[in-house]
Image: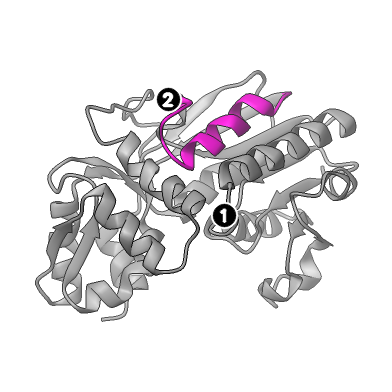
């Protein structure tokens, strides 16, 4: 069975590649910059360099593929990231149809069930709508790895968000997402369009996250809750376009008030890696 993996250098994609290789599969990896691939895997995969916004490239790279991991890359450039995400989804849908790809696992997000009003999550929702065939959608919680973009603030003892400090939400290690995705790709015994949430081990508030990280890092952390406009100002100050700013701000704004994930927490949606264990292994301290 031939399995293709998009974004193979990302947190989820790289984990899926590792597990497929360890399972005896030689995956095809669709990658924009092959130099970013882990040198240890380059001789164990078939590399298809190119850009997911190029329809001809996606169709050519997935020819002969039986199963596909579809991850829409994070887009922090350009004026209209949502349109770009939709175009990527259109290219994936066309390739699935043209190549008769039997099974696709889509990495999506909690909140995509809203379809509109959740910033860049709307782009994932559009991919859910566009992709055809046997499609398994994994709606994931907030990635632990987002904290890696906050290292300077954590060093200063601050955890910044636009969410209410005491509102719980699912947090998850993307490696655990990769574990589930790889298992489902290798099984490929499902049909239809099932949706499965990946909620991590527990719902956490930002205050709870600050307490956990403080214990690991050995310093007290304060939660700094910004307004949407304050966050917009900070993001524009970092040089991001208005389109990207609104896509980022909209993610939390759209899930802030009385939002409940469509898939409830269960044995199936709960994954093992705790934030404390992840932080001890991945954050400098």
Q: Is residue 191 above or below residue 118?
A: above
Say which of 245 and 261 sits in front: 245
Rounded to the nearest angstrom, the CA distance separating label 2 from label 1 is 20 Å
Q: Position of residue 182 (x, y in %)?
A: 61, 46
Q: Is residue 81 found left or right of 173 in the rendered image?
A: right
Q: Which residues are magenta?
A: 113-133
Q: Secondary structure at mark 1?
A: loop
Q: Quadrant of the N terminus?
A: top right
Query: What residue is rendered at 53% in x and 58% in y?
Result: 76
Q: Which residue is mark 1?
A: 75
For residue 40, above or below residue 255: below
Q: Which residue is mark 2?
A: 114
Q: Earlier in the sequence, mark 2 or mark 1?
A: 1
The answer to whether residue 188 of the structure is visible from this angle is yes
Residue at 25% over, 81% down = 285
Front in this rendered view, residue 270 or 205: 205
Residue 126 belongs to the span the image colors magenta: yes
Query: Looking at the picture, how far across and down is residue 188, in whole percent?
Result: 69, 32
């Amino acid at each position: 069975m031939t399995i293709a993996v998009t974004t193979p250098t990302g947190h989820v994609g790289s984990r899926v590649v590792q597990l497929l290789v360890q399972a005896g599969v030689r995956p095809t990896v669709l990658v924009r910059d092959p130099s970013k691939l882990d040198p240890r895997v380059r001789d164990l995969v078939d590399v298809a360099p190119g850009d997911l916004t190029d329809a001809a490239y996606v169709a050519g790279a997935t020819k002969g593929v039986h199963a596909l991991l579809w991850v829409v890359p994070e887009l922090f450039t350009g004026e209209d990231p949502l349109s770009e995400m939709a175009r990527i989804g259109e290219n994936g849908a066309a390739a699935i149809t043209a190549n008769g790809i039997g099974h696709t696992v889509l990495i999506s997000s909690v909140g995509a069930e809203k379809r509109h009003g959740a910033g860049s999550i709307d782009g994932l929702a559009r991919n859910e709508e566009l992709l055809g065939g046997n499609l398994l959608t994994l709606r994931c919680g907030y990635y632990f790895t987002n904290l890696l973009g906050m290292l300077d603030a954590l060093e200063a003892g601050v955890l910044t968000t636009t969410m209410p400090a005491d509102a719980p939400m699912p947090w998850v290690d993307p490696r655990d997402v990769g574990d589930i995705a790889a298992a489902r790709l290798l099984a490929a015994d499902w049909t239809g369009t099932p949706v499965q949430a990946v909620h991590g081990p527990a719902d956490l508030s930002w205050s709870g996250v600050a307490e956990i990280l403080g214990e690991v890092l050995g310093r007290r952390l304060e939660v700094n809750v910004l307004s949407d406009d304050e966050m917009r100002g900070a993001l524009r100050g970092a040089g991001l376009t208005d389109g990207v700013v609104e896509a980022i701000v909209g993610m939390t704004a759209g899930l802030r008030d009385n939002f409940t994930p469509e898939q409830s927490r269960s044995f199936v949606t709960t994954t093992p890696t705790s934030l404390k264990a992840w932080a001890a292994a991945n954050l400098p301290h």
